[in-house]
Image: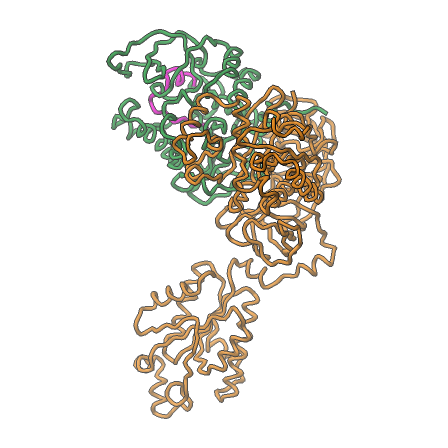
Chain colours: A orange, B green
């Protein structure tokens, strides 16, 4: 009997994936009687009328049956006389691409459905790309619904040509195209009576007979350490699964990342002491000397494995939150979990044409090529050479959702200057490090309107929320940076210009800046807005003059009224009301806490 | 070069998963239901960490309605292997007299689901192994190996974490937890063949023997103690029966069988036309009942 075959079915929505598998299991008498009974029952109460709806066999979630679609991957297990199979039936909707990718990462072969009435669709091509990304090298295309094109050979031939052409850009080791009808059962388990022109095998027969060579055949020994076992002082064992090659007692192994070497003294394959172990075996190894080994280290003999913290990878992004250069994630690669940042997104891949499109961000379900930097050096390998050390997932540091997965295309070295030029630390990276969106929150309004109090309260709140801030006000600016400026008009203009430039630098450093200056002239505020750019957020504190004068915290209004202060804004000098501030807030009619909440809501994501 | 057999591959996968959990999770526990899948899981745990003992305790949710032979087997096994076996019963439920005869599905909820949640919260376990397999039921066929639960222990089937290759994501926030199913990819046949190959001890109820039973609603229910009240017209008869799955005795149907050795059980399983869950009375409710229970925190 041949070994186990793990395969997936994929393709666009309504191409008939679940029906195909359902029919295969049904025909091959692989469904238990009670499941069959439930299936018939479900079909009757379902929306598709009295006939058996095979897809109900796989669409196991309530939401799936209600909506008549597949949301998540379903696994089915069956055995024929020739072979055991595990099939992952995957969703066709673009929205659930990540679940399709889950199935692909598990499989050795993909059965991709193509609707004969429609040919290859964008979604079909997306699925081929993802299958290839996740490591599938064997493809079967089932050109389905041949009954709807009257079993016409020319329709099939044209689609087959398209498929061959499209597949030529991927590293497929085998490709087979079969004309089928999933609902009618043509060429699924039995040869079709209507397509004498097709001389190949039925789908099931082909799957029973195909040989799939283990990709790791012939490779050197490699084992990521899952766990260090220390039941007592006498024993120290390193537990892991051999990813490739063999290990014998007496072998010398290299420990990565330290590159120290040691000799194998004992091997336990599960609970038995053995002289050697082969690829796939879960083992516990002890070594002849004390070396520093912890979880995430790798034992190996393979020179292709590098120790690095920089590499270029192709990533499938799976999260609603976009992938952004500089953002920090957890990465899991092999058995190692550590912080990592995306240094630079190089381009995204058009799923339809394969074209490289320049991109700064990646949205859900997009494929991008980017450079990643890890917080420390560890064993990394190109995915083509080692699945175990070349595939990784990215985990959101707040939600803990698995938000991306990818494969290492090639490693990068620090000495490569080109790399470092390309990957200079940018404003975005600095901001991401602080996990925030830089802003300059510019309060403007009359003296006594409440700007400074508001700015103070808002800053306290932001700091409590874990944000990194800086407050610029008259005290810290007039005493130092602007000590040489007076109050004549040209000095006032220069005062605001300098404040704006400082705020911009601080935004570049990733900080959220709050400024509290009267800044009475529209022209100057416009200039500040131009300097600071899109981070500028103007808040007009519109407390009426009477209220400001009533408060007169510093006694300035009284002095101005008495003529002791010339050019006092609101009394003897004009205040130009902002025309389009991002927010207007009057502190006479609400308390401070409420005002701060209003500002936070208006600021949105920070 | 030698290749692993099908069973060795499944074993290797389960062991890898257990080691990942032991290495990455703060406070794991292995649920132990005393059934054949639990026996396989326990056996794998012993192998996974050898020569060390499994670095986590085992937990049995005792509904007080398990077969007597199951409880004996549990205690004997724990003592023999020297493993830490915790048991937990929802005392509130017992005091309210909740039982499988009168309370139907609320019995399962109170004595199993609620009890499990209470036990996990009480000990602060953040990761719990379960013996569920994907070939058992349609909603299980959809579940990840590492299945995330929110602070209310609920499963969100529409928003499962992607699970790529064997890179399992064990990151959680305080209060959240993970259920782990190392036997996800095993079939009933694999379980039996592995039990045979490894000579794993299982509860004798799996082997056919003359037992006192009652025929009720198309199921064969064993009379395990005198709490079982007979309905009018029912009588206790002695039949040669065995169990394909074990749970609470009033909710577990037996099947008539002569299979009293592992070999004959495997033969019977291979030619079976009904899947094992048909003998679980609770699974017979409306389609989607398993999913609904899982969303509420059932294992």
Q: Which residues are magenta?
A: B57-73
Is there any visible trace of residue A50 in the rendered image?
Answer: yes
- Residue B47 placement, left or right of A586: right
Q: Position of residue B229 (x, y in %)?
A: 26, 15
In the image, B57 versus B200, the foreground residue is B200
Q: Residue at x 54, y 67 (%)?
A: A507
Q: Is residue A432 above or below residue A56?
A: below
**Image quadrant containing the C terminus of chain B:** top left
In the image, A479 versus A336, the foreground residue is A336
Q: Is residue A598 above or below residue A80?
A: below
Q: Is residue B43 above or below residue A551?
A: above
Q: Position of residue A37 (x, y in %)?
A: 43, 24
**Image quadrant containing the N terminus of chain B:** top right
Q: Position of residue B256 (x, y in %)?
A: 41, 11
Q: Is residue A242 above or below residue A428?
A: above
Q: Residue furthest bottom?
A: A563
In the image, A261 versus A96, the foreground residue is A96
Q: Could you say which quadrant of the image residue A601 lies in?
A: bottom left
């Amino acid at each position: 009997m041949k070994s186990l075959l793990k395969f997936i079915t994929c393709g666009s929505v309504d191409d008939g994936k679940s029906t195909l598998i359902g029919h295969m299991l049904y025909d091959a008498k692989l469904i238990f009687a009670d499941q069959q009974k439930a299936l018939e029952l479900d079909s009757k109460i379902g929306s598709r009328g009295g006939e058996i709806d095979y897809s109900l066999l796989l669409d196991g979630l309530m939401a799936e049956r209600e909506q008549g679609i597949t949301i998540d991957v379903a696994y089915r297990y069956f055995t024929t006389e020739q072979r055991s199979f595990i099939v992952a039936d995957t969703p066709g909707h673009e929205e659930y691409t990540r679940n399709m990718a889950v199935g692909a990462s598990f499989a050795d072969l993909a059965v991709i459905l193509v609707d004969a009435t429609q040919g290859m669709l964008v979604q079909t091509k997306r699925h081929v790309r993802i299958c290839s990304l996740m490591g599938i090298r064997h493809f079967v295309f089932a050109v389905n619904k041949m009954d709807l094109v009257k079993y016409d050979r020319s329709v099939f031939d044209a689609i087959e040509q398209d498929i061959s052409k499209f597949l030529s850009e991927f590293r497929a080791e085998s490709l087979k195209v079969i004309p089928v009808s999933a609902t009618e059962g043509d060429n699924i388990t039995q040869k079709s009576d209507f397509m004498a022109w097709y001389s190949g095998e039925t789908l099931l027969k082909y799957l029973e007979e195909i040989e799939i060579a283990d990709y790791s055949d012939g490779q050197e020994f490699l084992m990521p350490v899952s766990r260090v076992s220390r039941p007592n002082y006498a024993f120290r064992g390193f537990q892991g699964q051999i990813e490739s090659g063999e290990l014998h007692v007496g072998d010398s192994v290299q420990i990565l990342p330290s590159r120290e070497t040691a000799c194998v003294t004992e091997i336990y394959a599960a609970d038995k002491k053995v002289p050697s172990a082969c690829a796939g075996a879960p083992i516990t190894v002890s070594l002849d000397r004390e070396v520093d080994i912890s979880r995430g280290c790798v034992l190996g003999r393979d020179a292709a494995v590098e120790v690095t913290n920089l590499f270029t990878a192709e990533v499938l992004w799976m999260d609603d939150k976009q992938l952004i250069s500089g953002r920090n994630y957890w990465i899991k690669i092999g058995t190692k979990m550590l912080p990592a940042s995306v240094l630079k997104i190089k381009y995204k891949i058009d799923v339809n044409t394969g074209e490289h499109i320049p991109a700064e961000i990646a949205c859900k379900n997009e494929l991008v090529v980017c450079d990643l930097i890890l917080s420390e050096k560890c064993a990394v390998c190109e995915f083509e050479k080692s699945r175990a050390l070349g595939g990784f997932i990215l985990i959101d540091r707040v939600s803990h959702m698995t938000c991306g997965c990818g494969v290492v295309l090639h490693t990068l070295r620090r000495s490569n200057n080109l790399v470092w030029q390309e990957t200079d630390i940018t404003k975005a990276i600095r901001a991401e490090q602080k996990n925030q969106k830089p802003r300059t929150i510019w309060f403007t309004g009359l003296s006594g309107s409440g700007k400074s109090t508001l700015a103070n309260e808002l800053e306290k709140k932001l700091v409590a929320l874990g944000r990194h801030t800086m407050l610029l006000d008259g005290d810290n600016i007039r005493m130092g940076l602007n000590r040489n400026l007076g109050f004549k008009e040209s000095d006032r203009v220069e005062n605001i210009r300098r404040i704006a430039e400082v705020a911009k630098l601080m935004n570049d450093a990733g900080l959220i800046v709050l400024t509290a200056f009267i800044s009475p002239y529209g022209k100057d505020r416009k200039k500040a807005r131009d300097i600071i750019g899109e981070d500028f957020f103007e808040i007009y504190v519109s407390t009426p003059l009477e209220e400001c004068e009533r408060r007169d915290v510093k006694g300035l209004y009284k002095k101005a009224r008495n003529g002791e202060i010339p050019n006092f804004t609101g009394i003897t000098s004009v205040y130009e009301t902002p025309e389009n501030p991002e927010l207007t807030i009057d502190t006479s009619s609400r308390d401070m806490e409420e005002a701060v909440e209003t500002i936070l809501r208006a600021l949105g994501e920070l | 070069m030698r290749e692993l057999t099908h069973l060795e591959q499944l074993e290797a996968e389960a062991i890898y998963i257990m080691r990942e959990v032991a290495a990455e999770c703060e406070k794991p526990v292995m649920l132990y239901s005393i059934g054949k899948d639990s026996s396989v899981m326990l056996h794998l745990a012993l192998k996974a960490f050898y020569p060390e003992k499994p670095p986590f305790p085992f937990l049995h949710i005792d509904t007080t309605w398990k077969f007597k032979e199951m409880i004996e087997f549990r205690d004997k096994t724990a003592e023999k292997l020297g493993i830490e076996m915790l048991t937990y019963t929802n005392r509130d439920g017992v005091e309210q007299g909740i039982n499988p005869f009168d309370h139907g599905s609320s019995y399962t909820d109170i004595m199993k689901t609620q009890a499990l949640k209470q036990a996990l919260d009480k000990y602060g376990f953040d990761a719990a192994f379960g013996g569920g397999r994907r070939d058992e039921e349609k909603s299980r066929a959809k579940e990840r190996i590492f299945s995330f639960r929110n602070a209310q222990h609920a499963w969100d089937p529409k928003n499962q974490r992607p699970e790529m290759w064997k890179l399992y994501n064990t990151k959680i926030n305080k209060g959240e937890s993970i259920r782990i199913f190392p036997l996800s990819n095993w079939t009933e046949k694999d379980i039996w063949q592995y039990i045979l190959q490894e000579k794993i001890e299982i509860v004798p109820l799996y082997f056919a023997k003359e037992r006192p039973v009652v025929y009720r609603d198309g199921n064969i229910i064993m009379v395990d103690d005198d709490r079982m009240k007979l309905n009018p017209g029912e009588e206790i008869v002695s039949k040669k029966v065995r169990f394909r799955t074990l749970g609470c005795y009033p909710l577990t149907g037996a099947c008539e069988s002569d299979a009293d050795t592992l070999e004959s059980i495997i033969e019977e399983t291979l030619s079976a036309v009904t899947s094992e869950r048909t003998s679980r009375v609770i699974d017979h409710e409306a389609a989607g009942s398993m999913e609904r229970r899982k969303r509420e925190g059932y294992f």
